[in-house]
Image: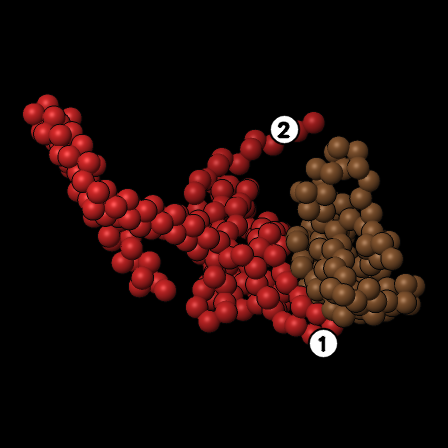
Chain colours: A red, B brown
Amino acid sequence: MNAIIRLAFIVLTFLLAVFSFVFLLMMVNSDILSQMIIMVTYLREQRTYQIVAIVFWLTVLVLCLTGMVYSILSGRLRRSRIRSSDIGTIDIGVDAIESIALNSAKTAQCGIKAAKAKVSPAKGDKISVLLNAILYSDVEVPAMMAKVQDRVKKDIERYTGIPVARVVVRVSRVEPVAARVER
Amino acid sequence: MAQGFVAQYAAEAAMQAEGVAGLDTSSVISLKEAFGVEHEGKGVKVVFREGNDETVAITVYPVVFFGTLIPEVAWQIQERVKADVEKYTGLTVEAVHVHVKGVVLKEERL
């Protein structure tokens, strides 16, 4: 499945490149533009060419749509079914896992001001967690983030029972510690 | 037997389980509520088996507290819902599916 979609992407991008090149030429040179218009109208009038062109563009359209759907769906884990007991199935939604990651990162007291978590599937029924964090400026990033990674991994595994392949922490910004106002 | 009626029992039973903060209502139902249509048994989906009015499959969408072991809470929900619905309505519960929708910290109640 993966190889097919890669091939489709390659074909699509190649076609896109060719057509954008042709259109570029048409924009630059009015001669080519008029020639192209004549050629296209000529092709349109021939029955066989018309059918071929319709089929071709339909394929391109379908390819585009599959590529779009695939790239939208592949990034996000939709649901993770952990197990089914004899009564029924138990699903843990992505939002739940993400908010566990967030809560455990925030309660770790490692100077995280705000964070965003994103869960994606990893190899072998595992999940990987990406944590985008904004820190306070008085944090030793490597030591503290190691602690956060450990904590997030342990918490998710304990509370949901889903094995975590890796936890990636990305520190996006550091904010100054707010001046404490004595009252 | 109406779906909403069964759903109410299921919702109540699910809320009784330990560690459940609330039930998540889907956006469709929220929309329905916004238009003033009353919906019974929020966060629960009840499906009767085709051609058999006595057998139901129930899906529960709970939001649990942070710090609870989700599989255990889910099992508890399944057992309670199955037992309660069978006891009060007399229907056969074929399956209770649990789809955990979210996790909240203890302080914020839904």
Q: Quadrant of the N terminus of chain A?
A: bottom left
The percent position of residue B65, horizontal first and vertical second, equals 72, 55
Residue B96 position within the rendered picture, expressed as x and y whole percent measured from the top left? 74, 66
A70 vs B99, nearest the viewer: A70
- Residue tagged by mark 2? A181
Front position among marks 1 and 2: 1
Residue A83 visible in image: yes
Taking the view exactly as shown, the residue that stands out farthest to the right is: B88
Mark 2 neighbour density, 10 Å: few (under 14) some (14–19) many (20 or more): few
Residue A62 spot, x, y in % from top left: 36, 49
- The secondary element bearing badge 2 is classed as loop
Q: Left or right of B92: which side holds B43?
A: left
> Which kind of residue does numbered mark 1 sit on?
Asp
Residue situated furthest bottom in the rendering: A86
- Residue at the image position 70 percent from the left and 64 percent from the top: B97
Mark 1 and mark 2 lie on one chain; the one further toward the N terminus is: 1
User: Which residue does the image show at 27% across and 58% down from the upper left?
Assistant: A7
What residue is shown at x 66% (from left), y 29% (from top)? A182
Which residue is tagged 1? A86
Q: Could you say which is closer to the camera, residue A149 or residue A24?
A: A24
Q: Separation of disc 1 and disc 2 at Cα?
A: 58 Å
The amino acid beneath tag 2 is Val
Output the chain of dot 2: A
The picture quadrant where one finds residue B108 is top right
Protein chain holding label 1:
A
Q: Is residue B80 visible?
A: no
Indicate the secondary structure of the residue bearing disc 1: loop
**How many marks do you count on the picture?**
2
Between A51 and A61, the residue placed more toward the observer is: A51
Determine crowd level at label 1: few under 14, some 14-19, many 20+ residues with C-alpha closer than 10 A: few
| Residue at image location 49% in from the left, 46% down from the top | A133
